Image (cartoon, rainbow, N blue to C red):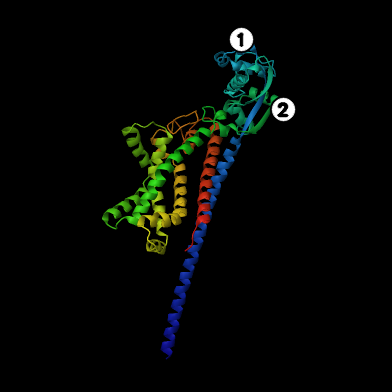
């Protein structure tokens, strides 16, 4: 009896030791998971802080007030009033003369050229547009706010320190003295950079905007949605509701799952070979970009749609068939409406993935420098991720902040699309 009790006690102690060991392992696993989550959040926070800290200054732009004398002898010396004559006038001279009014001691060609570099090289275009919009300005004097040059804008924002030796910065000491003098007179101020949202790309950082890339992204996503959604949903309905279970359908299902994991650049190569090489469609166009992204997005939508269709209880189908509905009526009138919230959620997630893709669009030429906002699906265009790629590769200092600002806009689009997907799932979710 004593031996039996001793054996039970030994067995209990061994069991307790094993149980304690399992509990310690579970606690370690829990701590490892928490450490992983906090590490991921910390890295994400550092990334977001870096992007916002670098890019928020792009939403402000430095402006300089210039007293411009719209002299008729410069703008329209013949007095014809023809648009061709107004367009050919030298408006840069008017800007230079306006700046010289504040610094009459500036002489010499070199100093005058350096003084003119205080303002953006595109400031004369603003004067041209003003005259074309209102020819009565000719012969008058106006106080015009024009953009400062990109280097001066970076200097005023503190991105170029004052204590850096002159030979190591692009803003000379003389320009610093001029801009300080203008600032003391209240002729320099920072404003909200609305042109960043209303202009297309430019070689000059202070003139560059994201409107062209945003419109290009929208046109590309429209093509992607129109092509991928109906085809993917019909394929999912057939495979889930009507397709026989045989080796052929198993082969198709396996390939659809594999296509969802294929690197996106492979779809770009496919689009380059088929759409551009074989069919001769225009390069760098939202039409081709949308077709390539549709091929990439279709497997994702098919998988999400099949999961949503499979989640509909069989009793719905049996009840519809019992009431005399045909299989097609059962699928389209009863099963599909109930599965549509899940299908839409998967579609929006697939579209968000397509919005952030860059590699396949690079292969079809959407990396080109486009200064115009696209007006149709066949116009040359670029998209937001490619615009970020182009600006990140630009050597000018002013594009650094604009790259981060464009990333912020792209993230805002992606977050908005994911919030919409969550809203649709919560709003139309059915619990069986």
Residue sitting nearer the eye, 347 or 104: 347
Real-space CA distance between mark 1 and mark 2, rounded to the nearest whole angstrom: 36 Å
Residue 253, percent from left and from top:
33, 53
Name the residue rendered at 47%, 33% in the picture: 390
In the rendered image, which residue does mark 1 sit on? 79
| Left or right of 235 on screen, residue 152 | right
Residue neighbourhood size for the residue with mark 2, other residues' Cα within 10 Å, grouped as few (<14), some (14–19), many (≥20): few
Name the residue rendered at 37%, 50% in the picture: 234
Q: Quadrant of residue 333?
A: bottom left
Residue sitting nearer the eye, 56 or 261: 261
- For the view shown, which residue lies furthest in the left direction? 247
| Left or right of 62 on screen, residue 316 | left
Determine whether the residue tagged by mark 2 lies in a helix, strand or loop. loop
**Sequence-wise, which precedes: disc 1 or disc 2?**
1
Q: Is residue 361 visible?
A: no
- For the view shown, which residue lies furthest in the front direction? 324
């Amino acid at each position: 009896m004593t031996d039996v009790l001793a054996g039970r006690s030994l067995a209990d102690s061994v069991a307790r030791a094993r149980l304690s060991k399992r509990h310690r392992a579970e606690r370690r696993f829990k701590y490892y998971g928490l450490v992983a989550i906090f590490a991921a959040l910390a890295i994400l926070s550092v990334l977001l802080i870096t992007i916002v800290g670098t890019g928020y200054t792009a939403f402000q732009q430095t402006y300089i007030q210039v007293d411009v004398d719209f002299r008729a002898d410069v703008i329209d010396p013949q007095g014809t009033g023809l648009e061709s004559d107004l367009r050919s006038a030298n408006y840069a001279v008017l800007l230079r003369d306006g700046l010289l009014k504040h610094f009459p001691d500036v002489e010499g060609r070199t100093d005058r050229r350096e003084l003119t570099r205080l303002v953006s090289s595109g400031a004369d275009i603003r004067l041209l547009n003003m005259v074309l919009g209102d020819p009565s300005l000719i012969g008058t004097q106006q106080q015009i706010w024009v953009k400062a040059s990109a280097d001066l804008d970076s200097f005023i924002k503190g991105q170029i320190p004052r204590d850096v030796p002159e030979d190591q910065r692009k803003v000379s000491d003389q320009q610093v003295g001029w801009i300080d003098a203008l600032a003391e007179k209240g002729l320099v101020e920072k404003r909200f950079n609305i042109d960043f949202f209303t202009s297309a790309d430019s070689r000059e950082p202070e003139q560059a905007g994201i409107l062209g890339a945003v419109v290009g992204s929208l046109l590309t996503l429209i093509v992607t949605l129109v092509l991928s959604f109906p085809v993917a949903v019909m394929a999912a309905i057939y495979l889930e509701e009507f397709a026989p279970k045989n080796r052929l359908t198993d082969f198709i299902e396996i390939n659809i799952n594999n296509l969802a994991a294929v690197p996106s650049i492979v779809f770009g190569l496919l689009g380059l070979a088929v759409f551009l090489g074989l069919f001769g469609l225009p390069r760098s166009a939202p039409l081709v970009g949308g077709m390539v992204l549709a091929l990439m997005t279709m497997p994702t939508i098919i998988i999400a749609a099949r999961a949503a269709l499979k989640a509909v209880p069989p009793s719905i189908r049996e009840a519809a068939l019992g009431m005399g509905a045909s299989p097609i009526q059962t699928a389209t009138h009863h099963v599909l409406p109930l599965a549509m919230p899940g299908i839409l959620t998967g579609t929006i997630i697939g579209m968000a993935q397509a919005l952030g893709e860059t590699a396949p669009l690079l292969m079809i030429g959407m990396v080109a420098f486009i200064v115009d906002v696209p007006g149709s699906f066949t116009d040359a265009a670029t998209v937001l991720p490619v615009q970020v790629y182009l600006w990140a590769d630009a050597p000018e200092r002013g594009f650094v902040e604009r790259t981060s600002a464009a990333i912020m806009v792209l993230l805002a689009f992606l977050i908005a699309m994911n919030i919409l997907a969550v809203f649709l799932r919560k709003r139309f979710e059915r619990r069986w």
